[in-house]
């Protein structure tokens, strides 16, 4: 009885350890995310006074371009009735006119309204014609000052994607005046490829700009504008191509292609040259990306296979319900996030130890009730666990919902990290990669350095001898299985950030995880790690060549051929103890 | 000996558990009684498709209960016969046969995936049953025994492409799950794009396995394609489960709806209810119905549905509206024919119309398709759609696409004198049971 208590103690402290280490990892991520300059920047308020009346095609609706304002929030600009009318119109084209007019209006109010439009927070009260900002339940009167405080019949002023793009571009151009170079950098980067609304303004910013990267971005924006413009002469286009040399501007690819096939010979050669440089650079970036994608896919495969490497690899139990253990882990995230809706990030981190416990306990129970009577009978084990996986799925369908459940991706798991100016990697994927290595290291340490690990290895190598020496083999079996299931639960927490959380989650991964374990070598943890990463990389290198569908099949065939020649996988167990 | 006993105990336990799970489904197969009209419901309640199909079963049960409260039909009560084909395509055919021969149902509402419909089709034609199929599909089919209450490609895909072309999109990436609906829909879309002057190299197609979850490479490709200058949009025929990881990856790689919009044909309110929809805001979907459509009949339906299902958070979607229209049409047709005899009901159905939930009218055409409005919606952060575009009135469903050479001359007309599902207008012949050349491959 004492030894059982001790083993449970190990189990509990392990899960606590998981929680602590990963919690700090998550917090680290959050801090990093806060510092990352790639996080979305809200275009700040525009300072007034800098008169820059834009030249636009539409001239009939200009609202007070020259009236200076001291404190715009207290005495808002006169919005011309024409703008208001087009804003209220149900026709998309009319709202286009309103947006252009607001874009040419330099006032704070126009900026605020544009931002409201962009975020879907601008409401128009039909009877009074007043404008409000906020949510339906909490609307603040924005214009005019003497409008009713409570709108009678507020309707959201809807914009579509194209209009949102235009607004982003208009607001972005305004934000180029921001004193913070980081803001200018982010905004100028976002403006590349967006429709050029005002080239002379960009030119003006370029002449004043001090930050190198922002300067480059502005140059690209202007050159792109020239290349796209059918009214520009060949000489101007040639200058634009020269301006682009030394800069990486994939957005120019299409225009360069068209020019390279154009009639002007000198322009065509210059364009072809620029295109070659561009494509060479793009290839390098694509290679780097592919390696990252491969490692990331590999890490996901390793993560779900580690638990199986313990139950199948070490114990020799074919557990078809392994995927459902991961599913339980993913539902734990959902459960905790439902309990603490205000802090999804904390819930995610706390879900790590919780999922380890939940899946571990379920796994232990399964071992004691279903698997124990079936040792040495692999076929029956397979059938029983397969049936169990169906039961668990249907139980979740009936108990929770047959629908997928919504798991929130917290801030530290979303967004990108910029490695270089042109290469960004997905933050969540990087964290999952390191998380996978961490889980691997922990499982490895448990098997190699703890009393439980020693007993597990003793029992799997020679059950009779281990029992003779006083190892409680049944309890060790239960705990081994619980450990494997618990690790599967932890992998489910990671999966919840990448894919659907629903009753079918486990099914989608069970074949892959068996493939990794068999390929890597049954009974060898290193094999699972290396095998998973190799399969991930191979998959991602094949995908661009023959498509996602064929890549998967090719990998499958490759693994089968490999196993035929090397039945024991990449890292076969050698020596006397290898019983497989 | 002891372990053998334990082993048997476990097996017995497993069997008992399986049975206990299937009992509620069997319980609904009530004993036959002569005074009722039986309505078959053939939707998966377990397996992969349960996520979508369970809802339609609930809608139909609600409509049947409501009809019974109104006094039933032809003086008889309606009786639902619910079967569970468990997302297993051959099982659909088996259960359909059971419904028609053993339970002798007057009508069947069911199927979701095209492959399940194809699987039951021969059964309905052999036994002369009547099936109402409620989901948007790839077309290129018309059966005497099926009423297609979902959209044909010209009621979804073609208007959606028109919208994108109108928004200045010059390059299209078609992404789909590898099975019959995306393949056929993409073929039609591609033919239509080429006809509208989009260059072949500006149409890029990707297919993925079911439940594809690692979208990194494809999304990076989309980003590269979309970032090379020309305005790009994605047309997605990605099925069910694979959508969430796809949209998550789009968000993770910082692709916003304003730079590269995604137009989806299989993402509706129900799919979004399992998703953190913030990263999806602004992406598009084309349907014939959205929950957000502000019409009194729609509000009434939503209130009834939430009351029936006892969950204020449940949403409504396009296939639910199609089921609603289908059920109302059948009731009207039976009242008109004064019998539930399939041939009489089919005769009564053509030309019949019933109000839809978006303020218009759904009319049964001679080709067994309906008239439907087409709406384009943008995803909002509450998982609902904001309608940004819609067709002027209803569009007539076209069974055979006019944009594919092999079906351009075909029409379907189940009224005399043609009475044929694949009638060639050029040669004035009915191809009859013979499938057109394209299908045989």
Image (tube, coloured by chain):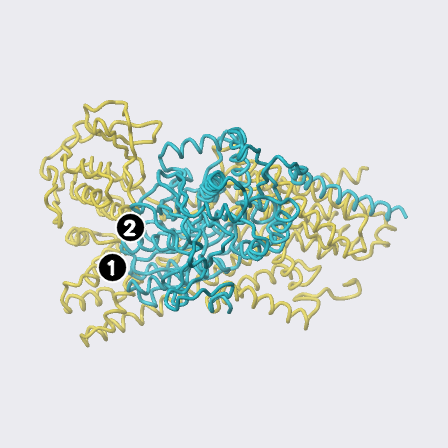
In the rendered view, would you say B314 is above or below B167? above
Q: Which residue is drawn at 70% across and 61% down?
A: A522
Reading the image, the residue beneath label 2 is A185
- Residue A78 in the image, given as x and y percentages of width and height: 14, 32
Q: Which residue lies furthest to the bottom in this view?
A: A265
Q: Where on the picture, by quarter, is residue A258?
A: bottom left
Q: Nearer the viewer, residue B45 or A471?
A: B45
Q: Nearer the viewer, residue A454 or B122?
A: B122
Q: Dot 1 falls on which chain?
A: A
Q: Residue at x 59, y 60 (%)?
A: A532
In the rendered view, would you say A138 is above or below A19? above
Q: The cyan chain is which one?
A: B
User: What is the C-alpha distance between the residues marked 2 and 1?
Assistant: 13 Å
Looking at the figure, which quarter contains the C terminus of chain A?
bottom right
- Residue A434 in the image, given as x and y percentages of width and height: 53, 52
Direction from residue A557 to residue B281 in the image, left or right: left
Q: Are marks 2 and 1 on the same chain?
A: yes
Reading the image, the residue beneath label 1 is A220
The numbered disc on residue A357 is none
Q: Chain A is drawn in which colour?
A: yellow
Q: Which comes before the other along the chain, label 2 or label 1?
A: 2
- Residue B403 in the image, given as x and y percentages of width and height: 36, 63
Q: Dot 2 falls on which chain?
A: A
Disc 1 residue crowd, few under 14, some 14–19, many 20+, Cα 10 Å: many
Q: Can residue B276 be seen in this view?
A: no
- Residue A113 in the image, given as x and y percentages of width and height: 24, 37
Q: Residue at x 31, y 44 (%)?
A: B388
Q: Where on the picture, by quarter, is residue A195?
A: bottom left
């Amino acid at each position: 009885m004492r030894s059982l208590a001790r083993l449970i103690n190990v189990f509990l402290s392990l899960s606590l350890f998981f929680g602590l280490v990963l919690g700090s990892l998550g917090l680290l991520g959050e801090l990093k995310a806060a510092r990352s300059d790639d996080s979305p920047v809200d275009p700040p308020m525009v300072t007034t006074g800098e008169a820059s009346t834009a030249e636009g095609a539409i001239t009939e609706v200009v609202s007070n371009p020259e009236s200076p304002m001291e404190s715009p929030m207290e005495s808002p600009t006169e919005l011309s009735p024409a703008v208001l009318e087009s804003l209220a119109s149900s026709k998309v084209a009319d709202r286009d006119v309103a947006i252009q007019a607001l874009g040419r209006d330099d006032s704070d109010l126009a900026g605020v309204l544009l931002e409201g439009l962009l975020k879907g927070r601008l409401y128009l009260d039909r009877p009074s014609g007043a404008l409000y900002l906020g949510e339906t339940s909490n609307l603040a009167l924005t214009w005019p000052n003497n409008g009713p405080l409570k709108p009678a019949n507020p309707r959201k002023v809807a914009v579509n994607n194209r209009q949102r793009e235009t607004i982003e571009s208009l607001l972005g151009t305004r934000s180029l005046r921001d004193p913070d170079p980081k803001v200018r950098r982010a905004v100028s980067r976002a403006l590349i490829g967006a429709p050029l609304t005002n080239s002379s303004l960009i030119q003006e910013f370029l002449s004043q700009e001090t930050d190198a990267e922002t300067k480059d971005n502005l140059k690209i924006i202007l050159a792109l504008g020239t290349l796209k413009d059918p009214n520009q002469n060949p000489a101007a286009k040639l200058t634009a191509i020269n301006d682009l040399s030394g800069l990486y501007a994939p957005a120019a690819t299409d225009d360069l292609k068209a020019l390279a096939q154009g009639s002007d010979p000198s322009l065509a050669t210059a364009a072809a040259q620029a295109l070659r440089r561009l494509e060479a650079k793009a290839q390098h970036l694509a290679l780097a990306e592919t390696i990252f994608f491969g490692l990331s896919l590999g890490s996901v495969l390793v993560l779900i296979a580690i638990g199986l490497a313990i139950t199948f690899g070490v114990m020799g139990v074919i557990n078809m319900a392994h995927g459902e253990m991961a599913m339980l882990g993913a539902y734990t995230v959902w459960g905790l996030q439902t309990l603490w809706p205000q802090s999804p990030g904390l819930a995610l981190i706390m879900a790590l130890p919780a999922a380890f416990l939940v899946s571990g306990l379920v796994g232990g129970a399964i071992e004691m009730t279903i698997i124990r009577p079936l040792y040495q009978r692999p076929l029956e084990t397979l059938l029983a666990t397969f049936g169990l996986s169906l039961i668990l799925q249907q139980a979740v369908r009936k108990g929770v919902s047959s629908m997928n459940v919504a798991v929130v991706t917290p801030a530290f798991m979303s967004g990108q990290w910029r490695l270089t100016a042109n290469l960004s990697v997905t933050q969540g994927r990087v964290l999952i990669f390191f998380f996978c290595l961490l889980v691997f290291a922990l499982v490895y340490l448990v098997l190699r350095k703890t009393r439980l690990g020693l007993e597990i290895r003793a029992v799997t190598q020679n059950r009779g001898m281990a029992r003779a020496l006083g190892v409680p083999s049944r309890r060790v079996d239960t705990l081994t299985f619980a450990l494997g299931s618990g690790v599967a639960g932890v992998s489910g927490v990671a999966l919840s950030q990448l894919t659907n959380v629903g009753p079918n989650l486990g099914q989608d991964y069970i074949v892959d995880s068996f493939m990794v374990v068999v390929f890597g070598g049954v009974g060898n943890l290193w094999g699972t790690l290396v095998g998973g990463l190799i399969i991930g990389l191979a998959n991602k290198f094949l995908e661009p060549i023959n498509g996602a569908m064929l890549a998967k099949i090719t990998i499958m065939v490759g693994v089968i051929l490999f196993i035929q020649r090397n039945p024991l996988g990449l890292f076969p167990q050698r020596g006397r103890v290898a019983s497989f | 000996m002891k372990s053998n006993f334990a082993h048997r105990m476990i097996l017995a336990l497993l069997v008992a558990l399986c049975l206990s799970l299937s009992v509620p489904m069997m319980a609904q197969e009530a004993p036959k009684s002569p005074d009722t009209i039986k309505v078959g419901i053939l939707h998966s309640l377990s397996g992969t498709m349960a996520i979508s199909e369970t809802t339609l079963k609930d809608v139909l049960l609600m409509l049947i209960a409501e009809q019974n409260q109104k006094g039933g039909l032809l003086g008889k009560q309606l009786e639902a016969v619910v079967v569970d084909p468990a997302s297993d395509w051959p099982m659909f055919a088996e259960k359909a046969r059971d419904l028609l021969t053993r339970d002798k149902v007057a009508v069947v509402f069911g199927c979701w995936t095209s492959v399940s419909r194809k699987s039951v089709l021969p059964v309905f034609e052999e036994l002369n049953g009547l099936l109402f199929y409620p989901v948007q599909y790839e077309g290129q089919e018309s059966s005497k025994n099926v009423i297609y209450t979902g959209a044909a490609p010209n009621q979804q895909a073609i208007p959606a492409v028109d919208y994108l072309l109108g928004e200045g999109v010059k390059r299209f990436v078609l992404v789909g799950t590898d099975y019959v609906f995306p393949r056929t829909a993409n073929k039609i879309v591609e033919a239509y794009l080429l006809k509208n002057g989009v260059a072949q190299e500006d149409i890029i197609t990707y297919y993925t396995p079911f439940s594809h979850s690692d979208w990194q490479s494809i999304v990076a490709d989309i980003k590269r394609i979309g970032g090379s200058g020309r305005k790009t949009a994605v047309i997605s025929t990605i099925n069910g489960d694979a959508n969430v990881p796809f949209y998550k990856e789009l968000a993770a790689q910082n692709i916003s709806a304003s730079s590269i919009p995604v137009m989806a044909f299989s993402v509706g309110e129900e799919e979004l209810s399992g998703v953190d929809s913030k990263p999806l805001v602004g992406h598009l979907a084309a349907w014939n119905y959205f929950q957000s459509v502000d019409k009194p009949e729609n509000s009434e339906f939503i209130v009834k549905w939430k009351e029936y299902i006892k969950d204020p958070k449940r949403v409504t979607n396009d296939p639910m509206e199609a089921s609603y229209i289908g059920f109302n049409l059948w009731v009207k047709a039976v009242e008109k024919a004064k019998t539930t005899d399939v041939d009489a009901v089919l005769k009564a159905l053509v030309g019949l119309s019933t109000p839809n939930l978006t303020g218009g009218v759904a009319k049964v055409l001679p080709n067994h398709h309906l008239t439907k409005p087409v709406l384009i919606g943008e995803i909002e952060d509450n998982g609902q759609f904001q309608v940004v575009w819609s067709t002027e009135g209803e569009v007539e469903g076209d069974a055979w696409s006019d944009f594919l050479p092999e079906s351009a001359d075909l029409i379907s007309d189940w009224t005399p004198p043609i009475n044929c599902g694949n009638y060639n207008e050029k040669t004035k012949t009915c191809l009859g049971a013979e499938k057109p050349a394209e299908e045989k491959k």
